[in-house]
Amino acid sequence: MASPHLFLCILLVVFGSYLSTISAAGDVTPRPNRAGAAVPLVHRHGPCAKSPSTDKPSSFAEALHRSRVRADYIMSRALRGRGTTTTMEGKYVVTLGLGTPAVEQVLLMDTGSDLSWVQCAPCNSTDCYPQKDPLFDPRKSSTYAPIPCGSNVCKSLQSNHLNNGCSMNGNGTQSQCGYRVEYGGGLKTRGVYSNEALTLAPGEVVKDFHFGCAYKQRGADDKSDGLLGLGGAPQSLPVQTSALYGGSFSYCLPPVSSGTGFLALGAPSNTSDFSFTPMTDFMDDGTSYLVKLTGISVGGKQLRIPRKVFEGGLIVDCGNIISHLPSTPYAKLRSAFRAAMAAYPLIPSDDDDTCYNFTGYSDVTVPKVALTFTGGVTVDLDVPNGVLLDGCLAFTESGSDGYVGFLGNVQMRTLEMLYDARGGGLGFRAGAC
């Protein structure tokens, strides 16, 4: 008999084109009609991954370290004018078609990046990292074209410090637009900024999608074929397709161990089941999305936290695993959570993390944690998937009170996160995947 997880994966393939959401019980619930397109989204260690990763999921200590590195780089990028971009840590991927005929590409999804790219042939093992799928070969696509160096599209890279200058074709007569991206985790990618057909779903083709055709990579990789940028700058997928889908998009991140979520372009025709909080850009970053947290509750009890300590706001970052809170909110949350979990043994930690040893416990009761945002929007995090990671409270300290924090992808799990470009808000819908 097929496993429940396999059954869920098959259901999503069958109903994916109808924008259906699959619940943990295996039910198929139609989502609000959209004028846009939706594609399945999975965790690369999850059971529905196209090619499940053979490496082990990061431990909490590893995830926390990488999360802090990513947060530091986002802050430094904003302060020094986008010299680098974020680390590749999200681990949620989508499968899209690139070229004509369309070739499947498994791309890491990231709201902290703008420029999308894939590794391109010809590229040997010295210049490109190993990937499970064949490299995208632009020579086999009838719709591929390099972007000219002097074009406005190429000039837009210069304003975002993504341009690597102009490279000459083999005949030395035609210049091409070069790109270069350096990620905080050590990965560097460069190649030709290009134009291609991008297939989102059957019948949903973006004819002139600008992406990086990568010919040289250095440093660590995340085993995907490339990256899909969902930030707010002109190079991102939502901005490039704003004429088609209005610039809005949403996603639902499933728990690692079960089911499939989705990435959808365009806003639902009916948003009555969403709760919205105002959303702005972060500083002059142009990429990151910012919301304001106003309160936290644990086990249904509101914590006594002065609202002024939240003034820095939270960067909504699906590429960051763990949420970061200023010192006072983090300390209050940690204390209340530990009190509610007093029945379970804490694992000693030099970093004062909140991790538990659940060995021998057949039933673990995790308290409900809720976040309240500007406008009185209260979001109940999924329990335990939106609260715990590897048996640890998936929050850490961002810095002093008033400092900018991060809303990580653990806390987003099972929620539909709707980035409403026209309304300037972030919408939350519970139990979406």
Image: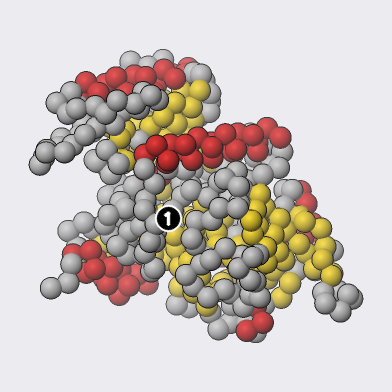
The number of discs equals: 1
Residue lying furthest front in this view? 126
The local crowd at label 1, few if under 14, some if 14 to 19, many if 20 or more residues have their Cα within 10 Å, is many
Q: Position of residue 257 (x, y in %)?
A: 27, 54
State left or right for residue 107 relative to residue 30.
right
Q: Quadrant of residue 362?
A: top left
In the rendered view, tell whether residue 71 sits above or below residue 318: above
Residue appearing at x 57%, y 34% in the figure = 72
Q: Which residue is mark 1?
A: 92
Q: Position of residue 379 (x, y in %)?
A: 32, 37
Residue appearing at x 42%, y 40% in the figure = 62
Q: Quadrant of residue 210?
A: bottom right
Question: Can residue 239 be seen in the rendering of this structure?
Answer: no
| Secondary structure at numbered mark 1 | strand
State left or right for residue 178 relative to residue 317.
right
In the rendered view, tell whether residue 108 sits above or below residue 119: above
Residue appearing at x 78%, y 64% in the figure = 177
